[in-house]
Image: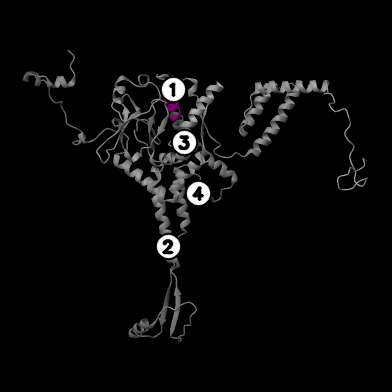
Amino acid sequence: MNLNPLTWLDLDTSPAIRNEFREAAGVSIDPDEDQWRRLTGDTSRELTPMTIWRMQQTAAYLWQANPIANRLIELPIAYLLADGVNLVSKAEDPELRLLVQDHIDRFWLHSINNFPIKLPKKIRELALFGEQCWPAFVNPYSGEVRLGYLDPSLIETPVMDPDNAEQPIGIVVKRNHKGIQKRYKVIVNGAEDDMFTQRTVGIRKTFTDGEAFFFKVNDLCTDSRGRSDLLPVMDWCDVYEQLLYGEVERQNAMRSYLWDVTLKGATADEVAARANKIAPPAPGTVRVHNDSETWAAVAPDLQAADGSIGARLFRNHILSGQTMPEHWYGGGGDVNRSTGDSMSEPTLKILSLRQAYIGHMLLVAARYAIRQREKAITRREPDLFDPIFKVECAWPEMSPKDTTKYASALQQVVVACGLAMDKNLLSPDTALHIINSVSGRLGVEIDAESELAQAALEASKKQEADAFPPPDLNPNPPNPPLKKGGRGDSKGVLNEPV
């Protein structure tokens, strides 16, 4: 007979049977072993709610008050979004592409969504708080989507899929002043029955206050909350700021001085009497005394090392934690252009990684808008592999390229390919692929097949033009040029021909 543990524990066993259960021989190795937990048995690496709240508050404070923390957030945003970003439909059918692009533009530029203005703010708070939650409001008749915003500090807990620990399925919001607690269903594009198990689908049905996008960064696979970009360097930003305040105090102390007055042969009473009468001389005044009184200005000699060395040490420690080169923050040191370019490459790789995630966020939102439009029209769940969902993010160049070296290389490659083709060592198709490998660095991609076809067409037109020159459409010679000084004058009478 199969019994679950609870049923088995509830069985009324006889004393004889109970007597069969005896404690094993031996003693515990550690008397407080029950108070320890195995390191390999705890997979929870979540931050506590209080730690998350403190992280969010501290990140917002540092962004406002600490210059270096502010730049650690703002500089990547400038590289990522200063030149804008667009969503572009890639549907092959031109008519379909125009229709989808029109719907994407309406979603992107709507006064409520207003991505060109609001996106930098959302990405700034993604970096500060480590997560973003955008409630979505859908018009059931037209399928138009409007996005709201839920501050991460108002999120009580994200609910994860019990059958897939890395997938959030719902957001529970903190209770408001009226005691109302909302529950949003996390948006996952696609039919729920195809995405989740029946148990998860049942749980998602309890989230009845609408749908919301939920994104998080700097997290592990099983983490339900994101982490701030500033979390690893918050304490060091504070240490760096304290160091600078200390330098200010040291500089003020070094600028201070006092007058040391020596009275030769004076008694204690005479010194006290002179001290009551004496006053520090004002600038430009005359001080008269005899040879028994000596005045000397004394400045402190703190014997302290140059504070710039320590400040640079802490600043570079903070910047290295964020993969930022020193010369991006005004600390050029001995960096020249060559080393500066090589030092920037790791930073650009990190920024490209964040750019890819932002692109994912935008594409998920765009596909949701297209999906809701399609559902409003067809009244059914669309196929996500339909051509209408072929959308891409059009990003500008994150860093301007040095085109001079690529232009020089392109010239050399073209000459070398031409010589190789003249000697029948290289086919035109292969030559174009080689040229394309260099022109691609300049942002121009060459389609070898179409370029060869176009080149052949232009060559045939030129050959035909050489064989059959066009007729002279104006057989009469042009009027001879006019010269000055003939009959007539400057009042409009024609001059004689040369």
x 44%, y 61%: residue:
304
Colour logic = one colour
Q: Are marks 4 and 2 in contact (CB under 8 Å)?
A: no
Residue denoted by label 1: 374
User: Tag 2: residue type?
Assistant: Arg
Q: Which circle's residue, 4 or 3, is located before the other in the chain?
A: 4
CB of mark 4 within 8 Å of CB of mark 1?
A: no
Q: Quadrant of residue 242?
A: bottom left
Kindly report the distance in space between the C-alpha atoms of the residues bearing marks 4 and 1: 48 Å
| Residue that carries the numbered disc 2 in the rendered image | 250
Image depth: mark 4 or mark 1 in front: 1
Mark nearest the camera among 4 and 3 is: 3
Q: Earlier in the sequence, mark 1 or mark 2?
A: 2
Tell me which segment is drawn in magenta: 365-374
Q: Amino acid at mark 1?
A: Glu
| Residue ID at (26%, 36%) | 180
Marks 3 and 2 close (CB-CB < 8 Å): no
Q: Main secondary structure of the magenta part?
A: helix
In the image, is residue 456 part of the stretch drawn in magenta?
no
Residue at left offset 44%, top offset 81%: 294
Q: Is residue 317 visible?
A: no
Q: Residues within 10 Å of mark 3 (few under 14, many from 20)?
A: some
Q: Is residue 360 above or below residue 59?
A: above
Q: CA distance from mark 4 to mark 2?
A: 24 Å
Mark carried by residue 329: 4
Element at label 1? helix
